[in-house]
Image (spheres, rainbow, N blue to C red):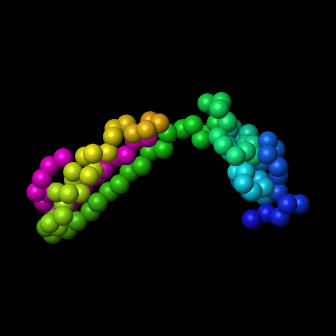
Amino acid sequence: MPTAAACLPESSECDAGQQRCCAPYRCWRGVGEHARCGSACPADNRWACHSAPHVGLMIARWGGWPAWMPVLLKTLGAVPRPGPNGTSITFLLLGEAPPASPL
């Protein structure tokens, strides 16, 4: 954690490298090289924090699928598509045989 003398106060221009924000602020990235210290993502949609995250999950299995696989498939099937704030999660099952119960 940077010392008070070495860190930047709220609303200062910052970068993820040598210029760090003072706690409890963090450096929010904007369009291009622009970044600013703050406690929350700025309301302007041009900031990177407004981009929806995308997650991929790959489950690989050789041999038979375990007995708890139907529970996992039901859990994966319950994930909202798209999720809150436009997030998306993609699942890929890879194996020698299909699982006993489909999504």
> Which of the image's four quarters has the N terminus?
bottom right
Expressed as whole percent of the image width and height from the top left, the position of residue 22 reads 78, 55
Q: Residue 28's quadrant in the figure?
A: top right
| Image quarter of residue 63 | bottom left
Query: Residue at the spot x=16%, y=57% of the render?
Result: 70
* Most distant residue in the left direction: 100
92 and 26: which is toward the camera? 26
Q: Is residue 58 left or right of residue 16?
A: left
**Along the horizontal axis of the image, is 12 left or right of 68?**
right
Q: Residue at x 37, y 37 (%)?
A: 82
Where does the image place residue 66, in percent across and percent down from the top left?
Answer: 17, 67
**Magenta span of residues:** 87-103
Asked whether 43 or 61 is in front, the reply is 43
Tell me if residue 13 can be seen.
Answer: no
Residue at the far right in the pictured view? 5
Q: Residue at x 33, y 40 (%)?
A: 80
The reply to whether the magenta stretch includes residue 100 is yes
Residue 73 is a magenta residue: no
Nearer-the-camera pick, 71 or 86: 71
Instruction: Say if 23 sits above or below 62 in the image.
Output: above
